Image (cartoon, helix red, strand yellow):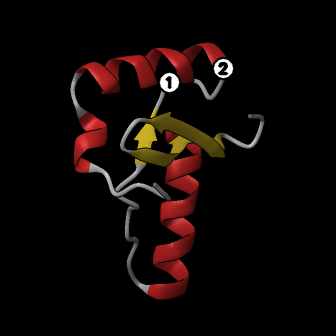
Amino acid sequence: MNKGFRNDVYVKLADGLFNVLFYDSVRLQQDFESEVENYGFYSIDPNLILVSAVNKEEIVFVIENLYRQQYFEKLKPASN
């Protein structure tokens, strides 16, 4: 959490297990600048979610809202 990202969040639903990446804006900016400097571009993962704070409460809140918005129906599962 202190690093501004979590890549170890999995959401288990009937149609699969989904790995969701959570980033705060500071970490995303750092990664963007580093990748552009090193490679000339930055490609965002389709399962990357920006949050105001990378903490359990925020992550649970966002997952619940994404589920209601049927976000996971558009995302490729990590496994079935």
Q: Which mark is residue 44?
A: none
Q: In the image, which disc is placed on residue 52?
A: 1
Q: Secondary structure at mark 2?
A: helix
Relative to the observer, which residue lies in front, 45 or 36? 45
Do labels 1 and 2 touch, CB within 8 Å? no
**Is residue 35 rendered to the left or right of residue 72?**
right
Q: Is residue 20 left or right of residue 76?
A: right
Of the 4 image quadrants, the one containing the C terminus is bottom left
One can see residue 9 in this view: yes
- The vertical placement of 17 against 39, above or below, is above
Tell me which residue sits at (52%, 36%) in the image: 11
* Percent of width and height locating residue 74: 22, 48
Q: Nearer the viewer, residue 27 or 48?
A: 48
Given the image, on which type of amino acid does mark 2 rest? Lys
**Alpha carbon separation for disc pair 1 and 2:** 12 Å
Residue matched to label 2? 56
Between tags 1 and 2, which lies in front? 2
Residue 29: x %, y % from top left: 50, 52
Task: Tell me the residue at 34%/18% (across/down).
Answer: 65
How far from the left and from the top, in percent, is residue 8?
Answer: 67, 46
On the picture, is 7 further left or further right than 44? right
Q: Residue at coordinates 21% horizontally, 24% vertically from top-left?
A: 69
Q: Amino acid at mark 1?
A: Ser
Image check: 77 left or right of 5? Answer: left
Name the spot of residue 77 as percent of width and height, x first.
41, 55
Disc 2 residue crowd, few under 14, some 14–19, many 20+, Cα 10 Å: few
Kind of element beneath mark 1:
loop
Q: Residue 38: which quarter of the image?
A: bottom right
